[in-house]
Amino acid sequence: MAGPGAICVTVIVMAGMTLWLPGGRAGIDNLVLPLVLAPLIWAVLFFHACLDRSVGRVALIALALLLTHGGLLAHKWANWPSTAKEGGR
Amino acid sequence: MIHLPKNETKLMVAVHGWSGILLGLVLYAVVLTGTAAVFAEEIGIWSSGHMSSTSAFERPVGQNVQALGSQTPTKYHEGVDLFEVGDHDLGAFFHRHEIDPDGELVSRGIFYRVNSNGQVIDRQAGTSEEVFGPRNDDALSHFLVDTHVRLHLPNPWGLLLTGILGLAMLVAAVSGLMIHRHLFKDIFTLRRKANPVLFNRDRHSVAGTWSLPFAFILAFTGSFFSFFGTVGVPIVAMAAFGGDVQALNSSVFGNPGQADPRPAPTSGIDRITRDAIQRTGEIPTFVTIENFGRADAKVTTFHPPEKGGVLPISLLYDGADGRFEQVKPLIGTKPSAGGALAGIMSPLHFGNFAGILSKAVWFGLGFAMCYVTLTGLRLWVVRRANETRSLGWLDRMVTIVGLGLPFALLCTAVAFLCTTSSGSALFWTPAGFLMASALVIIGGAFIRDRIKLSILLECGMGILMLILPSLRLFMGGPGWVIAMKAGQPIIAAVDIALLIAGLWMLARHFPQRAPRSGELTLQAAE
């Protein structure tokens, strides 16, 4: 479960990160960093799920990440297209 | 040193073993072909006997590009990719971006190949996927790269599979690090005179420990490349641009500026390439033109890293007057953390940042990774040999894939060399691989003694390696003196490497010596 579960959370986190990460000098960090960091995010979530003795804590952290990033995405899409011109922010 | 509690260590040992055992053989295939693909360019030069050493971008190509532009429909002037193809011929792909019926963003247009005399020797219309496929003269190197990148599976499944393999390798590398109680001691511990159990485990451990950072880097960058276009870009585009991939590409890779659709010839290409070579000291590997033939045309030249650098360089020019505008980051218009991180992925994965030297190091470490994967698989099987006899098939499978794959790849090279002069290498290169694979699988099914099978395959590889240089010459390839005079020492270098490796493979078995205890038979490690 740890592998596929971590993939699901990573996908949502990657999408959500585009909305809260700063754009940086070139204004693209929020678009590029989630792509670059995705394998690392997956690995951290996977090893956390394997090594944390409390399954509840693993589930709680995964759920918190899912809800915060999923919420950000839902908010963005609910207000579409008024936020579309902001270049993903 | 990492000290995990006993239970967690046990869990990590299990994770390390299963991550390898579930995908180990496929991972081995990807790593082995990737190791060979480090030298894909050199293998291409060697196998096709390329004799030209002058880059297409050192020749005046501007007039050719202008002429091609005038015979290409204006709708394909949205973008032009210029790059080298074959024996330093110029490839020019005039294209536009459009959404195909599956809803995917594709580049569609017309691809031209121009030889060193300025003659168009090939013209194809289609998407980038269609026109950049393998050709008769690069079928071998293309086959290697395609096996490594997507295992010849259709998009996106091949890339997804290699991406998952990258994650499995990441897990194996990190868990391998965690289960070392004495990391620094393990790096130097090779008990040659110890019993075979310890000796074999030490060999796996030493090779694995030395290549741990490399395994981590390769796994990380490899899964990044595999997932980038298949999962990452669509998801980020969905989140940030409502699914508009083109808008994401323009934001990340584009050159913002005011649109000026007035016609203006993009005539300064030769001046631009000359200036770019002078500024960077490196010949461009790729040149892109946005809005060809318009007043707002932009030309970007891409170069290998400068001496001592790791990041590739790109320069931006005005397309209408050839004026230099700025040193441009590979991604974005200004230097940024995200752009630098993404830019470093390619040199870290391909090991091409310091020429042949870094490629040789990457090749060696890739070879170590293959060794670690195979010995790890065998250790896992042997460790469970007492528990169940049903793993015998896996043990034999490790030999069939472990030695059969390089054997089949060498047969592929033979098939390529035999058929390229007749123009049928596109068919026979993969066919040679499939036939050799079938031969190895059938042989593996009949020869039940794993040691005999290993000796047969190793001798077969040795003989093939010795045959290949002569076969290349026999089929009309250039000799060493001619190649050296033409400035292509790589042809002789590959020949010599094959001869040395072939002799070494055969010398291991002729004259046949009694196997050292434990040399061919691994035993339970723990």
Image: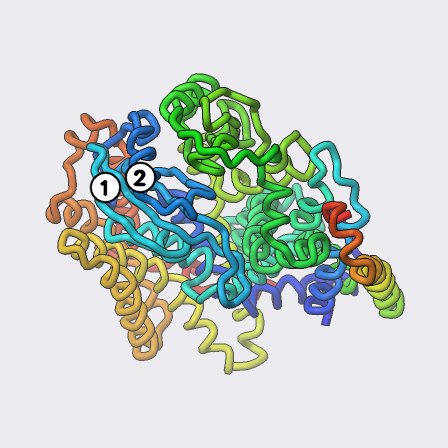
Contact check, label 1 and label 2, Cβ < 8 Å: yes
The answer to whether residue B343 is left or right of residue B450 is: right
**Residue furthest toward the front?**
B262
User: Which of the marked residues, 1 or 2, is nearer the chain's N terminus?
Assistant: 2
Residue B334 picture quarter: top right
The C terminus of chain B appears in which quarter of the rendering?
bottom right
Q: Is B98 placed above or below B68 here?
A: below
**SS for tag 1?**
strand
Query: Which residue is identified by label 1?
Result: B120
Label 1 marks a residue whose chain is B
Residue name at image x 25 percent, y 64 percent? B432
Where does residue A57 sit, x and y in percent of width and height?
A: 88, 65
Q: Residues within 10 Å of mark 1 (few under 14, many from 20)?
A: some
Query: Which residue is identified by label 2?
Result: B68
* Residue A52 appearing in the image: no
Where does residue B437 sit, x and y in percent of width and height?
A: 32, 68
Observer-side mark, 1 or 2, equals 2
The answer to whether residue B281 is left or right of residue B166 is: left
B22 vs B310, nearest the viewer: B310
The amino acid type found where label 2 is placed reads: Leu
Q: Is B211 placed above or below B397 here?
A: above
Where does residue B266 sit, x and y in percent of width and height?
A: 41, 30
Where does residue B106 sit, x and y in percent of width and height?
A: 48, 56
Q: Residues within 10 Å of mark 2 (few under 14, many from 20)?
A: some
Residue name at image x 63 percent, y 55 percent? B244
The answer to whether residue B53 is left or right of residue B334 is: left
The label on residue B322 is none
B471 vs B416, nearest the viewer: B416
Residue name at image x 35 percent, y 53 percent? B131
B235 vs B281, nearest the viewer: B235
* Residue B110 appearing in the image: yes
